[in-house]
């Protein structure tokens, strides 16, 4: 797959299909992007599992934190990687050892590792690189337009209410 550009249908399909998200590299520091992305996903109704070995046993954004993916007590639909690109291969390796496999490996803004992505895709896992699920959710749901930002999505459709705080849900086409 070409990871330089993603169709809206691909991203919205992912965001509409996942319910459990492991955020690898989640921070307990409430001014870090990984904290507010974790909190945003929780507020939108996702079941979020922060992964941070230094915070294991504590809470981040009101959710119990785990040291590694294998410690999460239920299957994970999406692994959101908030680590440097060179840390991606071992994280993808951990994800590939899970049973069942996650549906999606999502790498945050500036994070890209094509070889690890190919390995995940060979196992049947969808991959997104260099994107933020918070930004994509806001763009595709219309929330980002509330601030006057061009979301590149024009729709006259009435928003679909979803679970979570001020959530209109991600629109499919």
Image: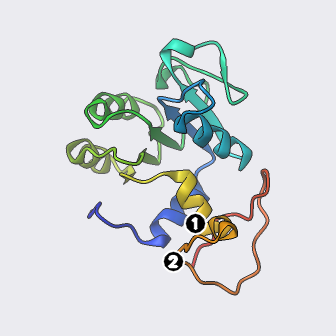
Quarter containing the C terminus: bottom right
Q: Around disc 1, counting alpha carbons within 10 Å, would you say few (fewer than 14), some (14 to 19), or many (20 or more)?
A: many
State the colouring used for the structure image. rainbow
Identify the residue at horizontal 37%, vertical 28% (top origin).
Answer: 94
Q: Residue at x 61, y 39 (%)?
A: 36
Mark 2 or 1 closer to N-term?
1
Quick one: 20 or 59, which is closer to the camera? Answer: 59
Which quarter of the image is occupied by the N terminus?
bottom left
Label 2: which secondary element? loop
Residue at label 2? Answer: 152
Q: Residue at x 53, y 30 (%)?
A: 26
Residue drawn at (49%, 72%) of the image:
9
Q: Position of residue 71 (x, y in %)?
A: 53, 19
SS for dot 1: helix
Tell me where residue 117 appears, x and y as whole percent. Answer: 28, 47
Image height of 52 relative to 122, above or below:
above
Q: CA distance from mark 2 to mark 1?
A: 8 Å
Rendered location of residue 170, percent (x, y): 63, 65
Q: So how many labels did they put on this image?
A: 2
Q: Quadrant of residue 6?
A: bottom left
Q: Nearer the viewer, residue 26 or 89?
A: 26
Contact between labelled residues 1 and 2, with CB atoms less than 8 Å apart: yes
Q: Is residue 91 left or right of residue 159?
A: left
Residue 171: x and y, percent?
A: 63, 71
- Which residue is tagged 1? 139
């Amino acid at each position: 797959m070409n990871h330089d550009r993603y169709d809206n249908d691909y991203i919205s399909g992912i965001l509409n299909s996942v319910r459990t998200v492991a955020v690898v590299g989640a921070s307990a520091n409430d001014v870090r992007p990984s904290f507010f992305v974790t909190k945003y996903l929780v507020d939108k109704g996702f079941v979020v599992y922060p992964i941070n070995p230094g915070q294991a046993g504590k809470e981040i954004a009101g959710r119990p934190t785990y040291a590694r993916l294998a410690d999460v007590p239920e299957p994970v639909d999406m692994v959101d990687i908030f680590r440097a690109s060179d840390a991606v291969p071992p994280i993808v390796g951990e994800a590939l050892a899970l049973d069942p496999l996650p549906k999606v490996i999502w790498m945050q803004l500036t994070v890209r590792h094509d070889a690890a992505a190919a390995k995940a895709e060979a196992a049947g896992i969808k991959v997104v690189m260099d994107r933020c699920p918070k930004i994509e959710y806001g763009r595709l749901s219309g929330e980002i337009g509330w601030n006057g930002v061009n979301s590149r999505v024009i729709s006259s459709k009435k928003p679909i209410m979803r679970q979570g705080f001020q959530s209109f849900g991600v629109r499919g086409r």
